[in-house]
Image: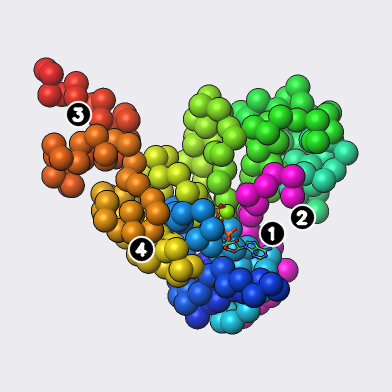
Amino acid sequence: MGSVIDACGVRHEYPDGTTAIKNIDVTIKQQEQIAVIGANGSGKSTLQLVLGGLVEPTVGSITFFEKTTDAETVRERLGVLLQNPDDYLFNTTVREDIEYGPAQLGYNRTTAERRVESLADTLGLIDLLDRPPFRLSGGEKQRAAIASVLAFDPDVLLLDEPFGAVDATYREQILHLLSNHTGSMLIFTPSVDLVPKIANQVILIGQDGGIAARGSVREILTNRNLLSTHGLRPPQTVQMFETVLPDADIPLTVEAAREFLLKRES
Ligand SMILES: Nc1ncnc2c1ncn2[C@@H]1O[C@H](COP(=O)(O)OP(=O)(O)OP(=O)(O)O)[C@@H](O)[C@H]1O
Ligand SMILES: [Mg+2]
């Protein structure tokens, strides 16, 4: 399978001298769905900016789609959701923000409008489309920002904490939209509980800003020692079942836990 992003020997230092990420060698392949987890301040957002081509690494290189091209020319294939939705919403109305990507890329107007309407419907934004984005609540802004990234149907999604302020109903809707995405996806989050629902691989960023581990969701999320070394805890279902079941059988989601308990009762 071809690679979509290759990072080689990447390190990023902010102007004040803070080294946010270092020794990053990573390849993201087509169709991989990866959760990048790590404690606050470990470097997830910095890594997202660098892998998304929005920030040049201080040291090392990033290659997109196996070619030595600059990020500008591949921008339309990367959908980057920044951690703060305010960095994303800058037009006069929510509708203009969501239509911005497809319009910039010259997409067919009717197709784009249909896609915008469909996203707005799924994400509960229909009544908010004519409002200025700064007049939205936190969760509404986050939903609008997600809609504006998905609107131009990018091949590769790099989403920084897409569920932070979103309530349970819309979390389900977003999970549903993301499960229909056929390209590669990187979700950057410090919360591990939703990871088994969105990813099949995990990259753990250590507290030193390097990659501490990469593996299957089960492998990483049942490794209590590894997670706690890097300031994280296993998902709640893992904490519940870890002394009761072997790692290979521990339910990773609430749904799997419920199924396990029902089966045991019958
Ligand atoms: N603009 C900046 N200037 C200087 N240091 C920064 C800047 N932005 C982030 N940092 C520092 O870089 C490190 C990594 O920050 P980053 O935002 O990438 O972490 P994160 O893993 O995304 O954290 P969180 O879970 O809180 O979102 C931290 O030590 C942070 O204080
Ligand atoms: Mg962050």
Q: Residue type at mark 1?
A: Glu
- Which callout, 2 or 4, points to the residue nearer the camera? 4
Answer whether residue 78 is magenta in the image: yes
Q: Which residue is mark 2?
A: 105
Label located before the other in sequence (3 or 1): 1
Question: Tag 1's secondary structure?
Answer: helix
Q: From this view, report whether residue 30 is shown above or below residue 119.
A: below
* Magenta-highlighted residues: 67-87
Residue 19: percent from left, percent from top? 57, 72
Amino acid under disc 3: Phe
Q: CA distance from mark 1 to mark 4?
A: 28 Å
- Mark toward the start of the polypeptide (3 vs 4): 4
Q: Mark 2 vs ligand 2: CB under 8 Å?
A: no
127 is higher (above) or lower (below) than 199: above
Q: Which residue is mark 4?
A: 214
* Image quadrant in which you'd find residue 246: top left
